[in-house]
Every structure is written in structure tokens, then in C-alpha cells.
Amino acid sequence: MKPRTARNLQRVTLYLLMAATALLFLLPVLWVFSLSLKDVRQVFQYPPRLIPEAPSWANYQFLLTRSQIPTYIWNSMKIVFMTVMGTILVATPAAYALSRFRIPRKRLVLFLILAFQMLSPMVIAIPLYRYFNQLNLINSHWGVILVYVAWQAPFATWVLKGFIDSIPIELDEAAMIDGATRWQSMLRVIMPVSLPGLTSAMIMIAINSWSQFIIPFVLIDSQALMPVSVGILNFQNTQEAIQVHLLAAASILATLPALAVFIILQRFIVRALTAGAVKG
């Protein structure tokens, strides 16, 4: 077999594997979307059909006008926005210090930061409830935001450190020769240059925070304050029977904001995942 033919065969095989993998993940989403366009009769039709006989947007109209799903989505947006801002505020100075300063046992510090990121929210949910109850942070968005910031900060620190490592230290030195302090150098020189890294970290933080369930489920009981991840479960509990078509439509609505961010800004997400691959 000629080398060119072999390369073409490998490429075709790779594309087929990628298409099969994409189909594996997209098929459940397509099925949920199909259910969201059906009525009760079509949902329980046998044999089931992926393409509805008479697709209708009535389920979405019902959710947007006669349910609390829009409130849940708005709550999630507020929580995610404050989480992103708080995490960047904490992680940026930490990443700058880890990148620029000579810290004793820096490798150990970095390992401990990464180890904290591996801690599951399920492990700390019940202790957090007792602690936050004493601080009057139950049924408060601020309690959820504080937990999210603490949980996302290690990841954001690692991502931002990788980007700051790639910025020549001579920029800091030139700024300080001109009279800038460390803080001024970080804010006026390093942060503008590392804007792609900041954007990447913010996108990943937003997507990770949007999908969280355990922490808001434990810390928030009020329906008016629930994010969409918990609100969908609460919506089902308020129904007299299992409304599969309405749950499917609610799931699609809850997915759209994160999906839109991922599609529009996927280049920054890839850059975030590969940050620090050259310099660590």
C-alpha cells in the first residue's frame, strides 16, 4: 500500500470514529429534543418514533409562560455570573504569585491546589449545610456562590498560571523600572496580555457552575431562589403526574445557555484545556 493511500485510509478511519463518537453523545440529546416536541399521546406511542408526527412548540410555550422555569434560568445566570467574577478575583493574584514568585515547595503547593479540585461536592455538602446554617446562608445565593468560588478557584488558578508562564517576565521588569508596583504590573500589564487566558478560564468556570446540582440542592429550599439544575426537579415534584414531554422541554431550555456559550466560544475553551502544555 502506498504511503499516501495509507494516510488517507487512516484519516477516513479517524473521521468515522469521530462521527460514531459524536452520534453516541448526540443521539440522547436528539431524543430529548424529539420528546419536547410531542404531546402525551405521542410520548407513549409504540413503536416510539424519533421524528414526531405533529411537532409542536406548545410545551415550550407552557414552560415559558406558566411555570417557574424562566425564574430558575435567571437564578442560574446570576449565580454563574457572580461565581465567575469571584473566582477570577481570587485566582488571578494566586496564579500571578505562583508564576512569578519563588515560593518554597512550589510543586507541593501546586499539587495541593490540584488535589482540592478533585474533592467531590457530595463529600462536603452535609458539613457545609450545618456550617452555613450557623452563618444564616441557607436559602441564599451568596452561600452557593461562596462554595462555587472555593471549588472553582483551584482550576482557574492552574489555567491562569499556564497563561502567565507564557508571558515574558521582562514585561514585569520593564513596568517596575518605570515605577509600577507589583499590583500595578499585574493589573495594567499582565492581565491585558493574558486576556485570552482570562476569557478561557471564565468560560470553563461558567459551564462547570451551570451544571452543578448537589450544592444548591442542599443549601436552597426556596423555589424562588433555585437554579435551573434543581428547579427542574422541583418542577416535576409540583406536577400531578410525570410529564415526560414537559421535562424534556425544560431540559432543553436549561441546556441552551451553556450550549450557546460552548459553540460560540469553543476556541477559547480548547485554549483553556491546553494552557500550560508547553510551560508548566
Image (cartoon, rainbow, N blue to C red):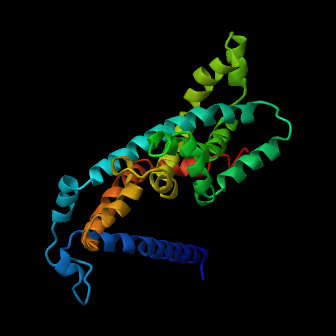
Rendered location of residue 17, percent (x, y): 50, 76
Rendered location of residue 250, percent (x, y): 30, 61
> Relative to residue 210, is residue 48 depicted above or below?
below
In the rendered structure, the answer to whether residue 192 lies left or right of residue 109 reads left
Rendered location of residue 93, percent (x, y): 65, 31
Task: Give the residue at the far right of this rendering.
Answer: 104
Residue 268 visible in rendering: no
Q: Nearer the viewer, residue 64 or 163?
A: 64
Q: Nearer the viewer, residue 208 or 67?
A: 67
Residue shown at 67% from the left, 13% from the top: 180
Image-quadrant location for residue 47: bottom left
Task: Give the residue at the far front of this rendering.
Answer: 134
Residue shown at 68% from the left, 10% from the top: 178
In the rendered structure, the answer to whether residue 9 lies left or right of residue 99 reads left
Residue 24 visible in rendering: yes
Rendered location of residue 252, percent (x, y): 32, 62
> Relative to residue 217, is residue 132 depicted above or below?
above
In the rendered structure, the answer to whether residue 135 lies left or right of residue 157 reads left
Image-quadrant location for residue 157: top right
Q: Quadrant of the N terminus?
A: bottom right
How many numbered discs? 0
Residue shown at 37% from the left, 63% from the top: 233
Task: Give the residue at the far bottom of this rendering.
Answer: 47
Image-quadrant location for residue 176: top right
